[in-house]
Amino acid sequence: MTLIATPRRTFCALVATTASLLAVAVHAHTATPEAPAAPQVQVAATTAPRYAAADIERAFSFMDANKDGRVSREEAAGFRNVAKHFSAADTDQDHALSLEEFESAMNRPKTP
């Protein structure tokens, strides 16, 4: 028996093939779960410091002209950004920056 391609037979074959492909596509779509949304990156409070401790100590030592272990407002005056933020960095309000206050201020996250 020889099959003769008639328009009706061609149409039925096309419909059957399309239906099969759609069934496979639907099954594949429902079989694989959607990928979860990418998590938003949040900066944690435990992020690495912006400056290494050795760099902080070197800069502090450079500013501490009289080598008393503290940077006074006068010593900080020669360093524009340190002088600008001196009051905020001087957390104990003793009019001098300790190494710990300086390190804390330098590694504090920037505010927009």
Image: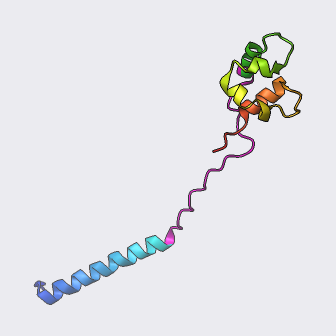
Which region is colored magenta?
31-55
Name the residue: 11% across, 87% down.
Answer: 6
- The residue nearer to you, when weighing 55 against 22, is 55
Q: Is residue 57 above or below residue 38?
A: above
13 or 27: nearer the viewer: 27
The answer to which quarter of the image holds residue 49 is: top right
Q: Position of residue 66 (x, y in %)?
A: 82, 10
**Which SS does the magenta portion mostly show?**
loop
Q: Quadrant of the N terminus?
A: bottom left
Q: Quadrant of the C terminus?
A: top right
Residue depicted at 29% across the width and 79% down the height? 18
Let me know if residue 54 is in the magenta part. yes
Colouring convention used in this rendered image of the protein: rainbow
Decide if residue 32 is on the left or right side of residue 25.
Answer: right
- What is the x, y in percent for residue 60? 76, 19
Residue at the spot x=67%, y=27% of the render? 81
Q: Residue 70: where, in percent of width, then height?
A: 84, 19
Q: Who is closer to the viewer here, 66 or 60?
A: 66
Task: Pick the residue in front: 63 or 52.
Answer: 63
User: Left or right: 100 with respect to 83?
Assistant: right
Instruction: Specify whether residue 43 is painted magenta.
Output: yes
Residue at the location (69% across, 18% down)? Answer: 78
> Which residue is situated farthest in the top direction here?
66
Q: How many marks?
A: 0
Residue 91 in the image: state x and y as whole percent.
85, 34
- Asked where in the image residue 35 lies, by quadrant, the reply is bottom right
The picture quadrant where one finds residue 48 is top right
